[in-house]
Every structure is written in C-alpha cells, then in structure tokens.
Image (cartoon, rainbow, N blue to C red):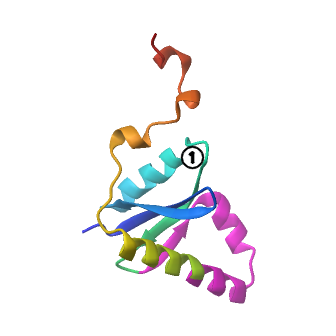
Amino acid sequence: MHRFSVIYQFKKQYYHIFCETHSEADTVLRKLFTKKKKIPVGIYDAKTELFFWEPIRQQKFDRLTLEEQGRVGNEIITIAQTLRSNDDHWKPTEAELLPDILQRPVFMMHD
C-alpha cells in the first residue's frame, strides 16, 4: 500500500508521488528541492489523514490563526486525497528524481 504522498506544485498545479514509508517520503521531498520548477509542499499520510508541511511552509502555517490553519489544512488534505484517488499507481523511477541537468555538478557531465 502506498501510505504516503509527497505533494508538490509544478506550473501552478498540484501533483503527488506515492511512497511506502515516511522515511522514503522525506527523501523524495528533499530531492524535489533540487528540481528547479517543482515546489515541494509536504507529505500526506493516508492512514492518519495528517499532512506534514515542508519546513518553510510549516513556519508560514504556524503564523496563521487557528481558523486559517483549519481552512488551509483541510484544503491541502482534500487536494492530497483527490490526487490519490485520481492516480493510485504511479511511482517515479530514480532517473525521474535526479536533479535537472543544469543543477548537476560539472564533473558529472560527459561529452
């Protein structure tokens, strides 16, 4: 079962990547920071129905009023649940998680 979904934005649309464990989801979330146009949002746990914001968004979330936190939290959980129900079997390959070519160290580039 794909318990976790890493939620990110690309071209103002939300997407997700299935993960088996929270540890795997943390790794995928960190790798998304190396993607130039993909904006990490956080990790959704389908079993507990909880959402874990990536650290910068968590700081912004913590500054909201309790009412705003409830509204924003419900919105992102609804987005995560919708993404999961629409696409319940896609998982990226390691090659899809590699940094964009312009972000790779020069020593890795070959002629």
In reply to whether residue 34 is colored magenta, the answer given is no
Q: Amino acid at mark 1?
A: Phe
Could you say where residue 19 lies in the image, as x and y percent from the top left? Answer: 34, 60
Residue range corresponding to the magenta coloring: 49-74
Q: Quadrant of residue 94?
A: top left
Quadrant of the frame with the N terminus: bottom left
Please tell me which residue is depicted at 64% across the width and 80% down the height of the picture. 72
Does residue 75 appear left or right of residue 99 in this picture?
A: right
Please tell me which residue is depicted at 43% across the width and 49% down the height of the picture. 27
Could you say where residue 30 lies in the image, as x and y percent from the top left? Answer: 50, 48
SS of the residue at dot 1?
Answer: loop
Nearer to the camera, 20 or 85: 85
Does residue 19 appear left or right of residue 40 in this picture?
A: left
Could you say where residue 74 lies in the image, as x and y percent from the top left? Answer: 57, 84
Does residue 32 appear left or right of residue 88 in this picture?
A: right
Above/below status of 6 relative to 68: above
Residue carrying label 1 = 33
In reply to whether residue 61 is colored magenta, the answer given is yes
Please tell me which residue is depicted at 53% across the width and 27% down the height of the picture. 104
